Amino acid sequence: MTAARILVTGVGGAVGGELAAALAERAPRARLVAVFSSPRSRADFLARAPRPVAAALQPVVCDLADPAAVAALTAELGPAGSTLVVHAAANVSWTASPEAARLGNVEVTRNTAELARRLGDSRFLLVSSAYTATSGWEYRNTYEETKAQAERMLRAEYPDLDPAVFSCSLVVGHSRTGAISRFHGIYPLLGLLERHQPPFLPGDRDGRIDIVPVDWVAAELSGMAARMLEGRPVQDVVAAAGSAAPLLRELVAAVVAALNRHRREQDRPELAEVPLVPFRRWDFLRRSVDAWNVTEIPMPNQQFLQRLIGVYRPYFENARVRPPQGVTEPAPPWGEYVDVVVDRWLAEHPRRPARAAS
């Protein structure tokens, strides 16, 4: 009998890459196919992956936005006893245009579901976000809206694939090493604090920012995938921290403390405490600094600051997220890994030396 197969998309991304590594260890009897969006993405992953993980994969390249390329991949893959498709590829940008977000999150999901259907005897596991839902939700950006659209489409049009959904929260680095392949989510905030030293930030100081480490996400997702591969019924999973997530003021204070530890080691001036102010006050203060030409309050580049705060504003004002559901273990306490997350980001984003005066 032909062996079972697990096909994972989005392996070049943070969750997909960590999932492929977990599956390589967890499901050695299954043939593991890793789908990359480009030859460069494949090369980058194989260069950084541990040798046993790279050896366990059948890496293929396919533009999942191209139906013809997806059809060709069907013939390339050939038969298997059964196939589990774990669709982790997505356009994760919070600022993507409606057209780009729909292509990356709805049409690519449709094409991947068509691939699963052509492969025969397949089940489908969609990786989505705990920051969205298919109903009763006010979407904060095109990412949330199109991920919900993809889930509704999958359930309506592909019931034969017995689809299940794994929704994870805002992913940060590995809980022990801080490693992550893509610095999205909270990482631009680290750059703002370290490089631009804002005197204050807008946001609900008592709102929670639900973050989870990528290794815990991959462990929960690989366990769900293993159960599906065995043909067992599964319930949808929401991998979130819930009430254990940090308050925004706690997270900002912890990040500043971690950054200051490095600054002390480098004999650099420490960052001051960064207070959080309501957005109404933030808007007033920002306009006042400009109108009154206040120089005592240093501010980052206005265009950069407005763009970045505009991205985060919906979450700093309304951090609604779905509660944990169906996980086998609670998320690790955020205080145990925030320092290594910051350490890893700093290691991969070293401070540029100041230019010499001419």
Image (tube, rainbow, N blue to C red):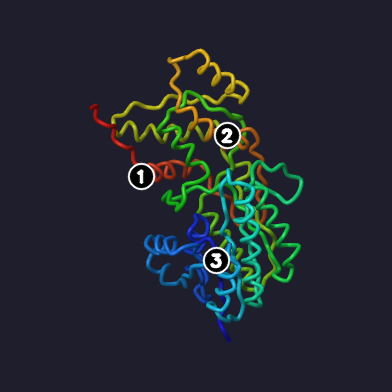
Q: Quadrant of residue 165?
A: bottom right
Q: Nearer the viewer, mark 1 or mark 2?
A: 2
Q: Which residue is mark 3?
A: 8
What's the residue at 51%, 41% (across, down)? 186
Image coords of residue 283 (percent x, y): 59, 23
The amino acid pointed to by label 3 is: Val
- Name the residue furthest top: 292
Q: Which residue is mark 1?
A: 347
Image coords of residue 148 (percent x, y): 69, 52
What's the residue at 50%, 30% (across, down)? 303
Q: Looking at the image, is mark 1 or mark 2 earlier in the sequence?
A: 2
Q: Is residue 236 above or below residue 75?
A: above
How far, Cα to Cα, is label 3 from label 1? 29 Å
SS of the residue at dot 2? helix
Question: Which quadrant holds the N terminus?
Answer: bottom right
Q: Which residue is mark 2?
A: 310
The amino acid pointed to by label 2 is: Gly
Q: Nearer the viewer, mark 3 or mark 1?
A: 3
Side (left or right) of 233 relative to 293 = right
SS of the residue at dot 3? strand
Side (left or right) of 88 relative to 18 = right
What's the residue at 40%, 34% (across, down)? 259
Question: Which quadrant holds the C terminus?
Answer: top left
Q: Is residue 192 above or below residue 116?
A: above
Q: Looking at the image, is mark 3 or mark 1 earlier in the sequence?
A: 3
Q: Quadrant of residue 227?
A: bottom right
The amino acid pointed to by label 1 is: Ala
- Name the residue furthest bottom: 1
